Image (cartoon, rainbow, N blue to C red):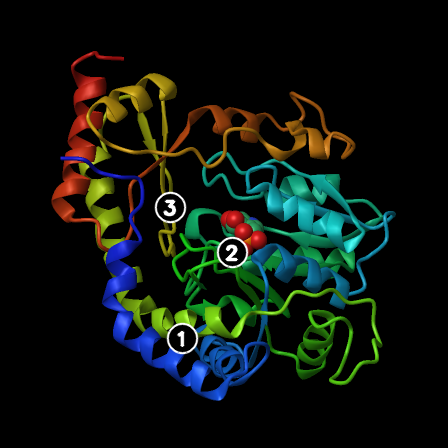
Amino acid sequence: MRIPFIDLKPAIEEARPLWESRLSEMFERGQFILGEQVAGFEAEFARAMGARYAVGTGTGTAALELCLRAAGVTERRMEVITTPLTAPFTGLAIRAAGASPRFADVNPETLLLDVDDTARRATRRTAALMPVHLYGRPCELDRWRDLAKQLGAVLVQDACQAHGALYRGRPLAAWSQYVAYSFYPTKNLGALGDAGAVVTGSARIRRRLAMLRDGGRAGGHVSRLAGVNSRLDEMQACYLRAFLTYLPEWNRQRQRLAALYDEALRDCPGVRLLDRTGSVHHLYVIRVRSREKLRRYLASHGIGTAVHYPVPLHLQPAFQDCGARRGDLPVAERACREVISLPLYPHLPEQAAAEVAGRIRDFYLRGRC
Ligand SMILES: Cc1ncc(COP(=O)(O)O)c(C=O)c1O
C-alpha cells in the first residue's frame, strides 16, 4: 500500500458542494477583495475559535507580523522571544515587523518553548513573547500570561498549527489579545492557497489590524498607519467557510488516528512519544533513533514522512545575528535530529496508520536499524 505523507484531495471533495455554492455567490456579487465572503468567514471563524473578532490576512506570517505591528513592537531594539523549533516564518514575521528575534530553548518533555528558560533569557528589551502551539499542542498559557505580565511584554500566540485547540478547557483567545493562525493548505483548516487570520477579544485591536492589513487605510485612499497589503482573498474565504464546517469532525478523525499511533508505538524500542495533552494533532511527531535510516526504510515501503524541523532557527543563515550559536539551545538542537512526522490527515484510513506503525515496529524490533 502506498501511503503518502499527506493527501488533501478527499477533504476537498467532501466539502465540494459547500465551496461551490460559496464561489457561485462570490461570482454573482463580483467583489473579489474584502467583500461578504471575508466578512462572513471572519464572523464564523471568530465564533469557532471562541473569540469576539477575527481579521483575515494574506498568510499566517502576515498575521504574526500584524499582531506585533498592532502592539507597537516594530523597532530593532525590541526583542521578541520565540522557539527555535518552528517554521522559519515565525522568526521572519518578527523581522518583518521590524523587531529582533531572540530564542530560548524548548522543554525536553514537550518540545514546546520553555517558560523558565524564556524567563532566564528575557531582558529589559523583551517587548513580546511568541510561544508556538507546535504540532497542535497548546502551550502552558497560564504561565505564559503571567510571565508576559511580569515582563510588561505582549503575548502573541503562534497558533498556525492549532486550529480549534483549547488550553485548560478555554479557547486560546481567552489567554491573550493576539492569536495568529495560518490557513496554509495542509493545516487543520487550510485554504487552497495562502491565507491567515488573527483572532482577538478587543474591538480596538480588531480595528487596528483591519487597517494594518489594508495599507493602513480605514476605507478610502488615505493611509493612516504604516500598514501592509495582506488581505484575505474572497476566493480563499469561500473555501475556508466550507472547510470550517468540517473542522470539528476532521479534528476528531485526527484524534482517532493519533490515538491509534500512540497505542501501537507506546512500547516500541527506539521510539519516544510526545505528550499530546489538549492537542488537535496537526502533525503526528515522534522522536526516534536512526531517523534517516528509518525514513529510507519507510520510503522503500511506499510510506511518506517529513521532518518538522530539521534545522533550529538559530542555526539558519537568516537568524545568524540573533545571538545564539550551536550548543546554546541543546534541547532544540537534539530534537531536530530526532523528530519525524508520520502520515496524519483526516481521511487517512486507520488501516494505513496501522501499517505505518507496524513497519516502524518491524524496523526497530527486527534490528533493521
Ligand atoms: C508554526 C508556524 N508559524 C508560522 C507559519 C506561517 O504561516 P504561513 O505559511 O501561512 O505564512 C506556519 C506555517 O507554515 C507555521 O507552521
Classify 10 Å Cα crowding around label 3: few (below 14), some (14-19), many (20 and above).
Answer: many
Amino acid type for the residue under numbered disc 2: Cys
Q: Position of residue 237 (x, y in %)?
A: 47, 73
Secondary structure found at label 1: helix
Q: Position of residue 122 (x, y in %)?
A: 76, 44
Query: Which of the labelled discs sits on residue 2, or is there none?
Result: none
Secondary element at tag 2: loop
Where the N terminus falls, by quadrant? top left
**Which label sits on residue 160?**
2
Q: Is residue 315 left or right of residue 256?
A: right
In the rendered image of this protein, does residue 357 appear above or below residue 164?
above
Label 2 CB sits under 8 Å from any ligand 1 atom: yes
Q: Residue type at mark 3?
A: Leu
Q: Nearer the viewer, mark 2 or mark 1?
A: 1
Q: Report whether residue 290 is seen.
A: no
Q: Are marks 2 and 1 in contact (CB under 8 Å)?
A: no
Distance between the Cα atoms at labels 2 and 1? 17 Å
* Callout 3 touching callout 1 (CB < 8 Å): no
Q: Is residue 304 above or below residue 294?
A: below
Residue that mark 3 sits on: 283
Q: What is the C-alpha distance between the residues marked 3 and 1?
A: 22 Å
Q: Nearer the viewer, residue 6 or 128?
A: 6
Work out whether residue 341 or residue 17 is closer to the camera in this orientation and state it: 17
